[in-house]
Amino acid sequence: MRLSMPRRLRGTVEIPGDKSISHRSVMLNAVAEGNAVITNYLTGADCLSTIACMQALGVEVEREGTTVRVRGRGLRGLQES
């Protein structure tokens, strides 16, 4: 058998969402200042609950499929629900 190597590889690989990273990305961006876009967010029930918790604390979070937009409020910006 003889194999030849291509000169170049080209393409895109999409890695599945990760539960721990999905939770942390929303929570950390909630206490950061400014806007963030999270892609490939895992959409399991517990990750969606994390979004709901952040919204209950006054954080603007929008989700469209696996893309999540967070408007961070800063370290002291969360509100009691």
Image (spheres, grey):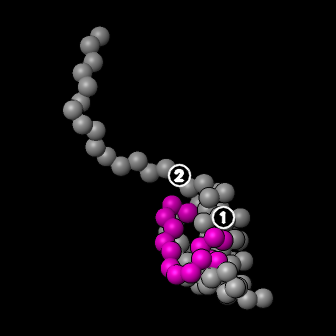
Q: Circle 2 is placed at which residue position? A: 16
**Residue range of the region highlighted in magenta in the rendering:** 27-41
- Of 33 and 51, nearer the camera is 33
User: Can residue 14 be seen in the rendering of this structure?
Assistant: yes
Amino acid identity at mark 1 = His
Q: Residues within 10 Å of mark 1 (few under 14, many from 20)?
A: some
Left or right of 25 on screen, residue 56: right
Which one is in front, 72 or 44? Answer: 72
What label sits on residue 46 in the rendered view? Answer: none
Residue 63: say if magenta. Answer: no
Above or below — where is 63 with respect to 20? below
Judged from the image, the secondary structure of the residue bearing numbered disc 1 is: helix
| Residue at point 65%, 64% (across, down) | 24
Q: Which quadrant of the figure has residue 70?
A: bottom right
Regarding residue 55, the answer to whether it shows in the image is no
What residue appears at the point 59 percent right and 77 percent down from the top-left corner? 32
Quadrant for the C terminus, please.
bottom right
Relative to the observer, which residue lies in front, 31 or 51?
31
Residue 29 percent location from the top left of the image: 59, 73
